Amino acid sequence: MRRNLPGLLALSVVGAVSGTPLLPRYINSTGSGVTCNGTFSRITAQTWVDGMNPGWNLGNTLDGIPDEGDWGNPPVVPATFDDVKNAGYKGVRLPDYKVNPAWLQRVSDVVDMVIERDMYVLVNVHHDSWTWADVTQANANYTQIEEKFYRLWYQIGIKLACKSSLLAYEPINEPPGTSAAHAAELKKLEGLFLQAIADAGGFNPHRVVTLNGPQENSDLTSQYFVRPTNISNPWAIQYHYYSPYPFIFSAWGSTIWGSDADKAALEADIANIRNNFTDVPLIIGEWAASPVATETAARWRYSDFFVRIASKYNTATVLWDNGADFLDRTNHVWRDQTAIDIYMSAHAGEANALPDSTIDPNAKTQHTSADLFVRVGQNVTSQTLPYILPRNITLLSIAGPNGKSLARGTDYSVTGNNITFSASFLRTFFTPSVSPGSIANLTLGFSTGADLTLDLVLWDTPVLSSTSSSVAAANGSSISIPVQWKGINKPATVKTVTTNGTYLVDDFTKYYGPLQNARTWNWDTNNLIITSAAVNAVQALAEDVIFTFEFYPRVPGNAVNYTLTV
Ligand SMILES: *[C@@H]1O[C@H](CO)[C@@H](O)[C@H](O)[C@H]1NC(C)=O
Ligand SMILES: *[C@@H]1O[C@H](CO)[C@@H](O)[C@H](O)[C@H]1NC(C)=O
Ligand SMILES: *[C@@H]1O[C@H](CO)[C@@H](O)[C@H](O)[C@H]1NC(C)=O
Ligand SMILES: *[C@@H]1O[C@H](CO)[C@@H](O)[C@H](O)[C@H]1NC(C)=O
Ligand SMILES: *[C@@H]1O[C@H](CO)[C@@H](O)[C@H](O)[C@H]1NC(C)=O
Ligand SMILES: *[C@@H]1O[C@H](CO)[C@@H](O)[C@H](O)[C@H]1NC(C)=O
Ligand SMILES: *[C@@H]1O[C@H](CO)[C@@H](O)[C@H](O)[C@H]1NC(C)=O
Ligand SMILES: *[C@@H]1O[C@H](CO)[C@@H](O)[C@H](O)[C@H]1NC(C)=O
Ligand SMILES: *[C@@H]1O[C@H](CO)[C@@H](O)[C@H](O)[C@H]1NC(C)=O
Ligand SMILES: *[C@@H]1O[C@H](CO)[C@@H](O)[C@H](O)[C@H]1NC(C)=O
Ligand SMILES: *[C@@H]1O[C@H](CO)[C@@H](O)[C@H](O)[C@H]1NC(C)=O
Ligand SMILES: *[C@@H]1O[C@H](CO)[C@@H](O)[C@H](O)[C@H]1NC(C)=O
């Protein structure tokens, strides 16, 4: 059966036969497509979106370039989806990269792993948006992109034609685009995607699809998304949410979150797209506040608020997890189980107790009740940590690392929202012989919502393997500085000011608070990194520059200077 979609009529035509509708030669609508055995239970897009919520992304795996293991993750195994399902997730988004028979079989097998567990699953083409399918490139050959895109989805459609209605499709991940012209071309690609899956046959014409606007950005989607007409598939809109960018990616010293203004900005974003599409099922296909990039209390508070607001606006959420963020797939352990528990209880509409933390953008230091910090050499005294206890949540118990309950009154006491740990209790952990690092995690159980962990951390200022080098030695490359961590194993930020007070880069940070002025950073597991861009900036300035690396806790003195000489 020939299926015409409105957008196709505008395509340039190759090999059109006179008297027939004008279609590019690659459109395969004359074939019969797949005929499936079995039945397909048709569902609405809203049912699919609700079923997928909350979901999890198998990030940086099937979308690895060029191969599954290339971005550091082990090949996916069925047990990964057991871990994900046991954690409370209902669906999996499978970012997918390339198409050859073996790869398609692999994707099909992974789809089956998910469906066999009665979980919902979403397949897309992923990094193609920044390899061959980028419609914003000056020399982009739209004809070629259109043909490739149709063929790609035709092949995927054939391979996955008979899967259950738990499987949905997403045409392309985060397609670049900023203008009406880009949006129009993306709309054309969307039409080709719909045509391709329809031509591939099987259950595809009834399968749920999640459509999107440029970049899967909520504002651009609100601005440019045009509702499809003449579509047989049930459809939802998908967008991604990583905002505020500086906090989510720990740029410019932005390590705090949670002020009323922060909350209002987040809610305004989620409400805006909902108000534009009041009758369309919405799904946030990627979001995350990763333990790798964010401070713990801020992360938990953000996650709690974000999931509640998404629910409030009837929007499903799918956590991005690149393999280093949340699930340790090899060891079947969630790296931040508390964040996952907060996610699940927020999703269920249960109130969560949360650690208090600094939210004032003009603060000079940052406190957190997610960690209890003792500095090396400091006399261990009692410590009071404030919590946020919504409604009438009460602390029921605190368990030590051995699972044994602490003695209230002796080990700790509670006054209002404050928990005070006694010096004698803390001294059983912070003994003179322990080394810097995480000493133990306590588990705080509340009358409602997620348990919270409290990490007892002995810290000192980290030590760098060297504290200076020259621009000449770097020779235009980035500089990797090995670091010996002493407490929390990641930097907070780096401040870069010349001797006369000039900011090396990002001068606009002077308008931010004291924890953010002149900040920027980059690092990997065991190294602090001065990027080649920063090296080049120092060279251009032709002056020695001091990089002040700052660590957690963000208190005076927890910083190391590194001088880059010219
Ligand atoms: C709409 O789709 C149907 C079935 O796919 C097709 O028969 C019809 O020609 C299409 N109409 C337009 C205006 O494209
Ligand atoms: C078109 O579909 C037929 C069967 O449906 C298939 O044999 C053929 O390879 C397809 N052609 C292209 C260009 O994909
Ligand atoms: C449907 O069943 C027939 C007969 O067993 C088989 O030849 C065909 O390949 C099956 N089709 C699909 C799509 O599995
Ligand atoms: C664009 O791609 C089409 C289809 O592959 C090809 O025929 C055409 O020559 C290309 N145009 C340019 C300018 O490369
Ligand atoms: C829809 O989104 C646009 C762009 O973000 C915004 O300006 C407009 O106010 C929104 N409309 C509604 C009804 O919220
Ligand atoms: C350490 O703190 C305790 C109170 O917790 C105090 O009695 C003691 O004098 C302090 N010791 C030193 C060396 O400061
Ligand atoms: C306070 O807790 C009680 C008992 O757990 C519960 O019945 C009541 O609804 C709660 N009140 C509020 C305002 O949440
Ligand atoms: C809780 O602790 C904070 C400091 O951490 C203090 O300012 C506040 O007064 C305390 N509140 C109560 C009720 O003890
Ligand atoms: C405490 O929990 C954190 C976060 O999960 C972890 O990195 C750390 O290793 C734990 N500490 C101990 C002593 O197990
Ligand atoms: C410096 O970089 C240039 C260009 O990348 C390279 O050709 C040259 O060999 C490098 N010099 C040293 C000493 O590594
Ligand atoms: C600081 O040094 C920079 C680079 O040499 C120069 O451009 C700037 O004018 C100086 N600023 C002041 C306040 O001296
Ligand atoms: C680090 O450098 C800054 C100037 O950027 C200076 O104010 C500070 O005293 C230095 N700190 C140390 C520990 O040398």
Image (cartoon, helix red, strand yellow):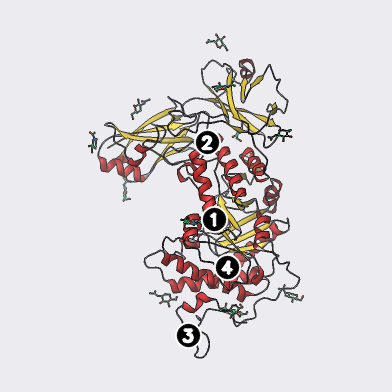
Q: Residues within 10 Å of mark 1 (few under 14, many from 20)?
A: few
Image-based side of 456 in relation to 358, left or right: right
Q: Position of residue 308 (x, y in %)?
A: 61, 45
Q: For mark 1, what is the residue?
A: 275
Q: CA distance from mark 3 to mark 4?
A: 26 Å
- Which residue is at 61% across, 56% downward? 93
Q: Which residue is mark 2?
A: 295
At label 4, the amino acid type is Asn
Near mark 3 (Cα within 10 A), the count class, few <14, some 14-19 or many ≥20, is: few
- The tag earlier along the polypeptide, 4 or 1, is 4
Give the residue at mark 3. Answer: 15
Image quadrant containing the N terminus: bottom right
The amino acid pointed to by label 2 is Glu
For residue 100, the mark is 4
- Three-letter amino acid code at disc 3? Gly
Q: Nearer the viewer, mark 1 or mark 2?
A: 1
Per the image, label 2 sits on a secondary structure element best described as loop
At x 67%, y 64%, the residue is 44
Label 3 vs label 1: CA separation?
44 Å
**CB under 8 Å between discs 1 and 2:** no
Q: Is mark 1 within 8 Å of ligand 5?
A: yes
Which of discs 2 and 4 lies nearer the camera? The answer is 2
Three-letter amino acid code at disc 1? Asn
Secondary structure at badge 1 equals helix
- What distance separates the C-alpha of mark 2 from that of mark 3? 59 Å
Label 2 environment density (alpha carbons within 10 Å; few <14, some 14–19, many ≥20): many
Q: Secondary structure at mark 3?
A: loop
